[in-house]
Image (cartoon, rainbow, N blue to C red):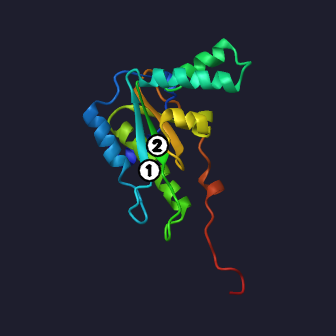
Amino acid sequence: MPDALDLLKKRKSISAAFLSAPAPSDAEIEQILSIASRVPDHGKLAPWRFIVFRGDAGGSAGALLADLFRQKNPGADAKVLDEERKRLAQAPLVIAVVSTAAPHVKIPEFEQLLSAGNAAMNILLATEALGYAAHWTTGWIAYDTDAGAILGLKPGERFVAFIHIGTPTAPPTDRPRPSLADVITEWRPPAGS
């Protein structure tokens, strides 16, 4: 198991197209989702849940999504429809993170949504700590209500992430990261205060 700081310094997504079997075992998936659940959660609401696609589930979901895409885009060509069929079937495991954020007397929905985003990030980190690779995606299916119904969303829920998980078939390549000088501002009191 990698050192935590080393893992955080080197974490890098690998595209779903480069993830293959083996995927995490049932015990490892349980461990990943247990870690995903250990996130900041103001009010202890657990404002998220997970939908797991493994085995033939990704292909079955993809067939339904391709049909929906064709209905919404009658001019879509065969190549695009084939990509839609494979959308949740490229990697051997996909975990969808669902935000269940709802109005609350004390906890803003935005904080609940951030908790779900943190759960998704913990999935990425736990996956990599176990020696696998992952890729966080969204795409049109994350925002389309008909796609959401096909994939199991309940009223008021929304997708935060589709995390594709497997064993990498290509080495990770890093992308340029922002210079810290460009993204850090140190606060100072306003002049005259």
Q: Amino acid at mark 2?
A: Val
**Residue drawn at the location 42% of the way across and 38% of the way down:** 51
Q: Are marks 1 and 2 in contact (CB under 8 Å)?
A: yes
Per the rendering, the mark at residue 97 is 2
Q: Is residue 137 left or right of residue 124?
A: right
6 or 113, which is in the foreground?
113
Residue 1 visible in the current orientation: no
Q: Amino acid at mark 1?
A: Trp
Q: Secondary structure at mark 2?
A: strand
How far across and down, in percent of the image, does residue 192 sit?
72, 86
**Residue drawn at the location 37% of the way across and 31% of the way down:** 132
Per the rendering, the mark at residue 48 is 1
Rendered image quadrant of residue 139: top right
- Residue projecting furthest to the left: 27
**Residue drawn at the location 53% of the way across and 47% of the way down:** 155
**Residue drawn at the location 40% of the way across and 27% of the way down:** 166
- Residue projecting furthest to the top: 78
Q: Is residue 191 left or right of residue 3?
A: right
Figure check: 138 above or below 89:
below
161 or 103, which is in the foreground?
103
Residue 108 visible in the current orientation: yes
